[in-house]
């Protein structure tokens, strides 16, 4: 079993909007899986695959990702982002020494472009500092220009490329 890692504290302004970040519970699995599958289906549809194939691929990838996450070691945090009691996102973190790594940050489409992602990332950066980390890191799909621009605007710097992913670091 991995050591637990605390989740970041969100700004009070988000609380006023009914947003909270809490630890994932066993009953959340269906909601976070659906969130991930919806996101993957959006990507596959753009590639021109039939919907049934997109759904099957997304389901397979969800299971593979879940299995991969079970094998991770080190301090980990599994967070669910709620707004007015409904799951609107997830935030998964892992600490490696002086690096706080965002394994996954994902928001449902209706919750994007309203500042929630920026607020979560900024809270993660502050959390990294509070943990004594020197950087906040993540991987980004290079074919996701909106995410790349957001991360760069906040202070992340592209430090490497591996296939379709870019490694980004935001110094603390």
Image (spheres, rainbow, N blue to C red):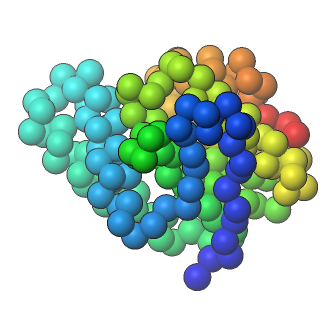
Q: Is residue 56 visible?
A: yes
Question: Is residue 73 depicted above or below 171 in this figure?
Answer: below
Where the C terminus falls, by quadrant?
top right
The percent coordinates of residue 109 (x first, y second) are: 38, 27
The image quarter containing residue 63 is: bottom left
- Who is closer to the viewer here, 40 or 125? 125
Q: Nearer the viewer, residue 142 or 101?
A: 101
Which residue is painted at 90% across and 55% down in the image?
A: 132
Q: Position of residue 35 (x, y in %)?
A: 35, 44
Write the residue at 85% across / 57% down. 131
User: Which residue is situated farthest in the bottom direction here?
Assistant: 1
Does residue 74 sit above or below 65 in this rendering? below
Residue 152, given in percent of the width and then of the height, sits at 70, 21
Left or right, 49 with respect to 32, comes to left
Which residue corresponds to the image point at 51% horizontal and 72% vertical from the top-left? Answer: 71
Left or right: 57 as drawn, with respect to 74: left
Q: Residue at x 78, y 40 (%)?
A: 125
Q: Is residue 117 visible?
A: no
Image vertical order of residue 111 relative to residue 123, above or below:
above
Depth check, front residue: 121 or 170: 121
Question: Which image quarter is the N terminus in?
Answer: bottom right
- Number of numbered discs overlaid on the protein picture: 0
Residue sitting at the far front:
16
Position of residue 151 measured from the top left corner of the image (x, y, whole percent): 66, 26
Q: Residue 99 vs residue 64: left or right?
A: right
């Amino acid at each position: 079993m991995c050591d637990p890692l605390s989740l970041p504290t969100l700004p009070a302004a988000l609380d006023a909007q009914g947003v909270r970040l809490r630890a994932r519970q066993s009953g959340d699995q269906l909601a976070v899986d659906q969130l991930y599958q919806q996101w993957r289906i959006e990507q596959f549809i753009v590639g021109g695959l039939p919907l049934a194939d997109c759904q099957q691929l997304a389901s397979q990838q969800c299971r593979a990702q879940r299995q991969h996450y079970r094998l991770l070691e080190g301090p980990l945090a599994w967070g669910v982002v709620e707004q007015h009691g409904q799951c609107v996102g997830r935030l998964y973190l892992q600490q490696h020494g002086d690096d706080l790594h965002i394994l996954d940050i994902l928001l449902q489409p209706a919750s994007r472009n309203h500042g929630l992602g920026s607020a979560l990332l900024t809270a993660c950066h502050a959390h990294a500092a509070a943990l004594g980390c020197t950087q906040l890191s993540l991987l980004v799909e290079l074919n996701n220009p909106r995410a790349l621009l957001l991360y760069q605007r906040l202070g992340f710097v592209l430090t490497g490329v591996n296939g379709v992913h870019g490694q980004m670091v935001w110094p603390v």
